[in-house]
Image (tube, grey):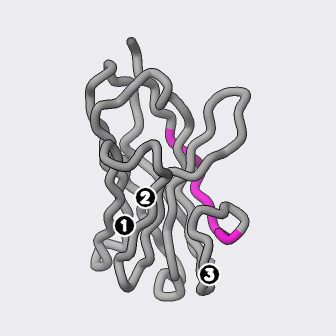
């Protein structure tokens, strides 16, 4: 069992920055990858970024690459999402997720078997 807890969301003006954190606890040694997804009101949950835990390989949704950066601190069992140049359309609930088996499609939310509760990010214009 892996438990995930997100933090760092909030209200920010357009052009601002936020850093989300996702602290993992429990059987964290079994983590293969961690990902960030977001869900805006009335929309489906979508992939944002992912990182393989041991190798540190990253994957981003194309439209966000360059503004968002995913990273992890293995010693702290924590993944981060640095978000810069935020836009009102980035407003969403952001979720972190962990996958504990090796898989190829980091963008596929079905591959992740643990999820956090989500943290709200609101970007005002």
Q: Tell me whether the residue at label 1 lies in contact with that at label 3, contact meaning CB atoms closer than 8 angstroms.
A: no
At label 2, counting other C-alpha atoms closer than 10 Å, the crowd grade (few under 14, some 14-19, many 20 or more) is: many
Residue of label 2 = 22
Q: Tell me whether the residue at label 2 lies in contact with that at label 1, contact meaning CB atoms closer than 8 angstroms.
A: yes
Mark nearer the viewer, 1 or 3:
3
Residue 121 spot, x, y in % from top left: 46, 32
Residue 94 in magenta? no
| Distance between mark 1 and mark 3 Cα atoms | 20 Å
Above or below — where is 62 with respect to 79?
above
**First to last magenta residue range:** 111-119
Residue of label 3 = 103
Residue of label 1 = 78
Residue ranking furthest to the top: 125
Residue ranking furthest to the front: 62
Say whether disc 2 or disc 1 marks the residue closer to the N-terminus: 2
Kindly state the secondary structure of the residue where label 1 is placed: strand
Above or below — where is 34 with respect to 63?
below
Kindly state the secondary structure of the residue where label 3 is placed: loop
| Distance between mark 2 and mark 3 Cα atoms | 20 Å
Say whether disc 2 or disc 3 marks the residue closer to the N-terminus: 2
Kindly state the secondary structure of the residue where label 2 is placed: strand
Residue 115 in magenta? yes
Say whether disc 1 or disc 3 marks the residue closer to the N-terminus: 1
Q: Nearer the viewer, residue 68 or 36?
A: 68
Residue 99 spot, x, y in % from top left: 59, 75
Name the residue: 38% across, 75% down. Answer: 57
Quarter of the rendering occupied by the C terminus: top left
Q: Quadrant of residue 110?
A: bottom right
| Image position of 89 (left or right of 57) | right
């Amino acid at each position: 069992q892996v438990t995930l807890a997100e933090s760092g969301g909030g209200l920010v003006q357009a052009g601002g920055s936020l850093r989300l954190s996702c602290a993992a606890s429990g059987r964290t040694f079994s983590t293969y990858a961690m990902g960030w997804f977001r869900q805006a009101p009335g929309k489906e949950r979508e992939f944002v970024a992912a990182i393989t835990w041991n190798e540190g390989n990253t994957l981003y949704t194309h439209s966000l690459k360059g503004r968002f950066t995913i990273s992890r601190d293995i010693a702290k069992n924590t993944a981060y999402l640095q978000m810069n140049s935020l836009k009102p359309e980035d407003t969403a609930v952001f979720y972190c997720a962990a996958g504990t088996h090796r898989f190829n499609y980091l963008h596929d939310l079905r591959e992740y078997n643990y999820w956090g509760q989500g943290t709200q990010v609101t970007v005002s214009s």
